[in-house]
Amino acid sequence: MITGLTGDSVIRFARGVRLQHDRVRERWIIQAPERAFIPDPVAAEVLKLVDGTRTLGQIVAELATRFAAPVDVIGRDVHVMVSDLITRQVLVA
Amino acid sequence: MTETILSPMSLLAELTHRCPLQCPYCSNPLALEPRRNELSTQEWISVLDQAAEMGVLQVHFSGGEPMSRPDLPDLIRHAVGLGLYTNLITSGVLLNEKTFPMLVEAGLDHVQLSFQDIDTANAEHVGGMKGAQARKLEAARLVAADGMPLTLNFVIYRENAARVPQMLDAAVEMGARRVEIAHTQYYGWGLANREALMPTAQQLEQTTQAVEAAREKYAGRLTIDYVTPDYYADRPKPCMGGWGRRFINISPSGRVLPCHAAETIPNVAFPDVRHDTLAHIWRDSPLFTMFRGTDWMPQPCRSCDQREKDWGGCRCQALALAGDARATDPVCSRAPDHERVVRVLETLPAEPPPFRYRRYVRATDEVG
């Protein structure tokens, strides 16, 4: 868990990392230095909302509305996932 | 044909074999391509268009030294426009305050910068270029200052193996996000210099420990890719993720290869982009189909439970060590020719012989 990551943290991709649609294989991929990997469907939904302006709280709220799920449940999962992606140098907060 | 043909993921564009350095472990073939045979800018642009259309996601601009080509910014810009992830694999000796901004402006995503050693004197002895280390350090500084992600690549061999801990510390100090600690692979120039480069088993063990310690020390700050010399392994590497499965290499003159050492394979035509389309070459050329999948495999690979994990290992290594590109990679302890690998390691000289430096052979260059 990344300390200091709060609902007010603005989430963005690390430089040199991006989410991209692979039209040949019809799936989302994360393009990163010298590797491309496939996000699971939930991670892809989160990453699609990462635009460098939304806060973690706004991303959670958006997902809660979209999937008609409780904010506190989604919030916990997204927080863990974003922390992990920060550790893996995909996202920065 | 029982094999599923996948779309390639990754393209290695070897823009030129020209390079200011002369590293004795260079991955280029022994017969280096002269400048006059190199593909034109327009020919490379067509290659990039075709690659993107086929599903390639990442293009690695390499060489030789790719910054020897003045059209590099144009090729990067074109690749970026196609949605390709662009990586520059460079020695850094031509990367400076004048040239780097042009690459940034073109949209380059990432730089992989190679070092011959962290010790300047030995680095310049191995690279064969005085003053190279200072230029590389300046290149690293420029990339890090810009914020572009930086990977450092250290090729490991007998003489520098003890300095892996310092290399890893230096990588963090230089602001690298990734570092490759890559033991020499023994093809082409590396094979020609094997007795001078091959580390001992004890040295290998020490580098492995240094990498493990640094992974703990720099967790979350530095990703370390560690490549071992497979002569010391029991199982072969899944070379290129399998022949013709994920990877395309284009040589400076446009030959299309399943790996950068494939030009050693005898009795097969080498397809090239001046005479055929990339998609047709990938799908149907004899070179790409000859070792694709598992149908070609001899025993013990054919009935081995690892056959779709290691894909029989490396064809070029089978050729180099067993004299037959169709043989099981002799690195595998189950291979009939495994004894040859053991013998190489048992007969390493106590004193390493002098390097045979990577150089153009003038006669080859002129006859071309």
Image (tube, helix red, strand yellow):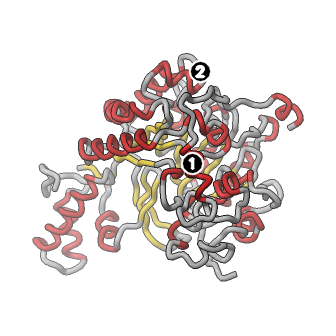
Q: Nearer the viewer, residue B63 or B166?
A: B166
Question: Would residue B120 appear left or right of A85 to someone viewing this image?
Answer: right
Q: Is residue B40 above or below residue A24?
A: above
Nearest to the eye among marks 2 and 1: give it.
2
Question: Would residue A23 appear left or right of B119 to someone viewing this image?
Answer: right
- Assign the C terminus of chain B to one quadrant of the image: top right
- Rate crowding at label 2 as few (under 14), some (14 to 19) or many (20 or more) other CA atoms within 10 Å: some
x 54%, y 55%: residue: B58
Which numbered disc flags the more N-terminal residue, 2 or 1? Answer: 1
Circle 1 marks a residue in which chain? B
Q: Hey, what amino acid is under mark 2?
A: Met
Q: Is residue B55 visible?
A: no
Which of the 4 quarters of the picture holds residue A45? bottom left
Q: Secondary structure at mark 1?
A: strand
Q: Residue B260: where, in percent of width, then height?
A: 65, 50
Circle 2 marks a residue in which chain? B
Q: Nearer the viewer, residue B66 or B169?
A: B169
Furthest toward the left, the residue is A72
**Label 1 sits on residue:** B60
Q: How many marks?
A: 2
x 53%, y 17%: residue: B131
- Tell me whether marks 2 and 1 sit on the same chain: yes
Q: Is residue B279 above or below residue B153?
A: below
Q: Residue A56: where, in percent of width, then height?
A: 19, 59
The numbered disc on residue B129 is 2
Q: Hey, what amino acid is under mark 1?
A: His
Furthest toward the right, the residue is B367
Task: Give the Cα separation between the discs numbered 2 and 1.
Answer: 24 Å
- Assign the N terminus of chain B to one quadrant of the image: bottom right
